[in-house]
């Protein structure tokens, strides 16, 4: 089940794990496993990837990072199949992602003996990249009656859905805004007119999907596997320059 109507679907380069994720979700449809269980599984996979980096098992790292991406898609697929969308799952997923990203970059800094300042700059770059991609993607999903669990502007805690507790939603929302609030505000400031966009073409969204977390993790995994770990931090700092490029293109095609 897609998050967008068919005519608005695009080739999402960060979502390469979706086919396997659907298989996993369908296999769990009639079991007691919930989307939250799958989210916990991707956290475990991310932690295993970090452990592999510390032990210099870089091909294994790549495997667990890709597996993490697959499971990251599977929790949402399972929620849609079981018709149990929740803000608990939505915020737990996002909070888990950003904590794992930070731990992953710090681990790479540790094994490369690089600059902690540049590492944190790369982390901020990765988060801003992902925020821009999600910003445009959520605009599409809200506009074309796709999945609406994610909101364009996360200003107030949403009302808990059936089967979840408002207190849990409130706590996770607070964590979400703590971790993501600054990045969201920066991107909204840089491209505040995006919500009025009449066009976000499929080809454009495919290009921006290289900012998606799945694609980022694939790049990190491959760079580690091919002994390019010293270039991971510089790469993501440099690739962040494309934030301005994509915003410029978005404005041009909507002029």
Image: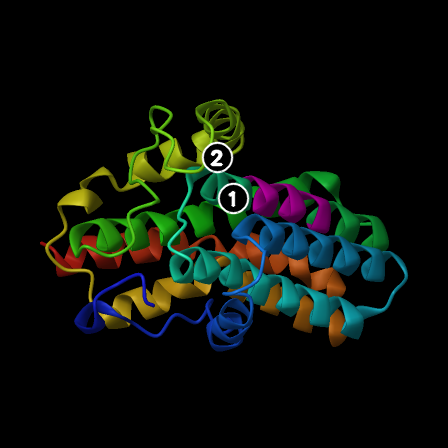
Query: Mark 1 highlights which residue?
Result: 94
Q: Which mark is residue 180?
A: 2
- Name the foreground residue: 74 vs 199: 74
Disc 2 crowd rating (10 Å Cα; few below 14, some 14-19, many 20+) is some
* Residue at the image position 26 percent from the left and 63 percent from the top: 4
Can you say which quadrant of the picture contains the N terminus?
Answer: bottom left
Q: Earlier in the sequence, mark 2 or mark 1?
A: 1
Question: Residue 103 colored magenta?
Answer: yes
Q: Residue at x 68, y 68 (%)?
A: 221
Instruction: Label 1, secondary structure: give it.
Output: helix
Q: Is residue 208 above or below residue 117?
A: below
Q: Is residue 228 visible?
A: no
Specify whether residue 147 is painted magenta. Answer: no
Q: Main secondary structure of the magenta part?
A: helix
The reply to whether residue 179 is in sight is yes
The answer for how far apart the CA atoms under marks 2 and 1 are is: 9 Å
Q: Residue at x 34, y 28 (%)?
A: 159
């Amino acid at each position: 089940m897609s998050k967008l109507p068919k005519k608005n679907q695009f080739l999402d380069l960060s979502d390469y794990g979706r086919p396997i994720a659907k298989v996993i979700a369908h296999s769990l449809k009639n079991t007691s496993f919930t989307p939250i269980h799958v989210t916990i599984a991707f956290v475990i996979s991310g932690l295993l990837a970090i452990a592999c980096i510390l032990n210099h098992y870089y091909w294994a790292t790549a495997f667990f990072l890709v597996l993490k991406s697959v499971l990251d898609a599977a929790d949402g697929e399972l929620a849609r199949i079981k018709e149990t969308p929740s803000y608990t799952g939505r915020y737990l997923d996002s909070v888990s992602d950003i904590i794992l990203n930070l731990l992953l970059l710090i681990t790479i800094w540790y094994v490369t003996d690089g600059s902690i300042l540049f590492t944190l700059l790369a982390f901020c770059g990765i988060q801003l990249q992902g925020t821009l991609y999600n910003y445009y993607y959520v605009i599409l999903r809200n506009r074309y009656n796709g999945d609406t669990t994610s909101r364009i502007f996360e200003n107030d805690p949403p009302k808990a859905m059936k089967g979840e507790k408002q207190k849990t939603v409130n706590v996770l929302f607070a964590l979400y805004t703590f971790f993501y609030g600054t990045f969201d505000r920066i991107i909204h400031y840089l491209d505040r007119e995006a919500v009025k966009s009449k066009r976000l073409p499929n080809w454009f969204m495919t290009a921006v999907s290289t900012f998606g977390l799945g694609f980022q993790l694939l790049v990190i995994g491959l760079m580690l596997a091919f002994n390019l770990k010293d270039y991971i931090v510089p790469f993501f700092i440099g690739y962040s320059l494309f934030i301005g490029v994509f915003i410029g293109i978005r404005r041009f095609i909507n002029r």
